[in-house]
Amino acid sequence: MREKLRRFMAGRYGVDALNQFLSIASIALLLVALVSRLALFTWVAFALLIWCNYRTFSRNISRRTEENYKFCTLKDRLSGRLGRYRRMWADRSTHRYYRCPQCRQQLRVPRGRGRIEISCPRCGTRFIKKT
């Protein structure tokens, strides 16, 4: 049986990060549909499951790889932004964050130093802020 499945999947795309996300999202939407009793969530969840299965059994491997690459790029960009906000929240008692008025670079300065002159390492602009 395992060999038959292996032969069937030969030349097909299989499972990747986007498929895993689609599966988890569809399960979450089905749970929301159970609680809220709205049919819209059920239909969206089934659409996601159909799309997930289509991607799994697809023979257009290059197209599926490109879709997964775009998804992973977006996911990494969002997780980087969330990580930055998490770090800012953890440092809120010891540091302040400012943006350079010239290049918009985010700068971290220690809290409690009074009025200080901050120089941007990227563009060299100097500005005064209260910490």
Image (tube, helix red, strand yellow):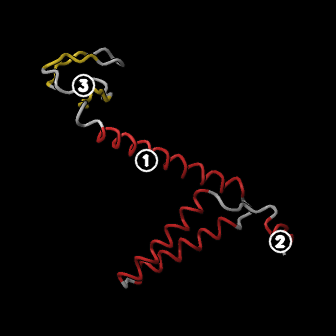
Q: Disc 3 or 2, which lies upstream in sequence?
A: 2
Residue in the image at 82% along x and 67% along y: 6
Q: Is residue 70 left or right of residue 83?
A: right
Badge 3 vs badge 2, beta-carbon distance below 8 Å: no
| Mark 1 vs mark 2: in front | 2
- What is the number of the mark on residue 52? none
Question: Which residue is the site of mark 2?
Answer: 2
| Point 22% across, 35% down: residue | 93
Q: What element carries label 3?
A: strand
Badge 3 vs badge 1, beta-carbon distance below 8 Å: no
Residue 52: image location, x then y, percent:
60, 68
How many neighbours does mark 3 have within 10 angstroms: few (below 14), some (14-19), or many (20 or more)?
some
Can you tell which quarter of the image residue 53 is in? Answer: bottom right
Q: Relative to 40, say whether 57 is above or below.
A: above
The residue under label 3 is which amino acid type? Pro
Vertical relation: 121 (above or below) 101:
above
Query: Disc 1 designates what residue?
Result: 78
Three-letter amino acid code of the residue under disc 2: Arg
Disc 3 versus disc 1: nearer the observer: 3
The disc, 1 or 2, on the residue closer to the chain's N-terminal end is 2
First in sequence, mark 3 or 1: give its number: 1
Q: Identify which amino acid the numbered label 1 is placed on.
A: Leu
Q: Distance between the residues labelled 3 and 2?
A: 60 Å
Residue in the image at 17% along x and 21% along y: 113
Quarter of the image with the C terminus in it: top left
Q: Which of 92 and 16 is in front in this view?
A: 92
Residue 81, x across and y down, in percent: 39, 43
| Label number found at residue 110 | 3
